[in-house]
Image (spheres, coloured by chain):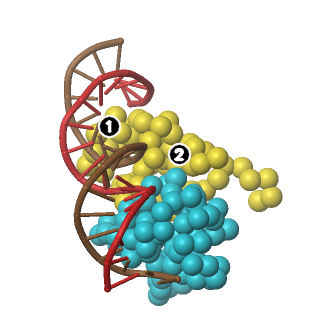
Chain colours: A cyan, B yellow, C red, D brown
Amino acid sequence: MSEDVRIMVGENVRRLRLAAGISQAKLAERMGVDRAYISGLEKGERNPTVVTVWHLSKALGVKMRTFFEEKDKKGR
Amino acid sequence: MSEDVRIMVGENVRRLRLAAGISQAKLAERMGVDRAYISGLEKGERNPTVVTVWHLSKALGVKMRTFFEEKDKKGR
DNA sequence: TTGTGACTCATAGTCCGTA
DNA sequence: TTACGGACTATGAGTCACA
């Protein structure tokens, strides 16, 4: 279902943010958005636009496609 | 710049739609949206959400990451 | 077959406070 | 450090008539 996309993106945001070793506040600051928004994003409650995903990719230093990687697809 | 993301996504939508050999109207029908929306999308005038991209991926039978592939990065 | 402007309505995203 | 809530504004979703 499409709600799964929000969850998937949120999980990836949190994973990549923690990998970068920064707080939600720091990420928000880098992106120029509100910290509360990051919180909702990571929880899968938000449906970001592609421009927002682009900002995320810049702030975290990863490619946009990284946010659409699924967790544990068995076959690879 | 972030506007480039819209252009990139739009170009990929058009490319993948043509590869599928269908009209904007047909794609719109598969997604359950208006044809005019697809038109704006392909022209890079729209900033779709990740859920919209998910619908696109289902309608075109491709992975979401496909819409974020850059054209002609020299190094590969 | 596709593009465009004008439109309504939902939601993206902000800012405040509180826990 | 993060979550949560309400109230708010900006903008995206989605449609239509016409070119």
Give the residue at mark 2: B6
Badge 1 or badge 2: first in the primary sequence: 2
Give the residue at mark 1: B35
The amino acid type of the residue labelled 2 equals: Arg
In the image, B72 versus A54, the foreground residue is A54
In the image, C1 versus A18, the foreground residue is A18
Question: Could you say where residue A43 lies in the image, as x and y percent from the top left?
Answer: 39, 76
Q: Residues within 10 Å of mark 1 (few under 14, many from 20)?
A: some
How many badges with numbers are in the image? Answer: 2
Question: Could you say where residue B52 lies in the image, as x and y percent from the top left?
Answer: 37, 55
In the image, A76 versus A6, the foreground residue is A6
Q: Position of B11 compared to B53: left or right?
A: right
Q: Are marks 1 and 2 on the same chain?
A: yes
Viewport quadrant of the C terminus of chain B: bottom right
Q: Which mark is residue A18?
A: none
Q: Residue at x 60, y 45 (%)?
A: B4
Name which quarter of the figure residue A46 lies in.
bottom left
Question: Could you say where residue D13 lies in the image, as x and y percent from the top left?
Answer: 32, 49
* Chain bearing mark 1: B
Vertically, is C15 above or below A1? above
- The extreme right residue here reads B75
Q: Secondary structure at mark 2?
A: helix
Q: Secondary structure at mark 1?
A: helix
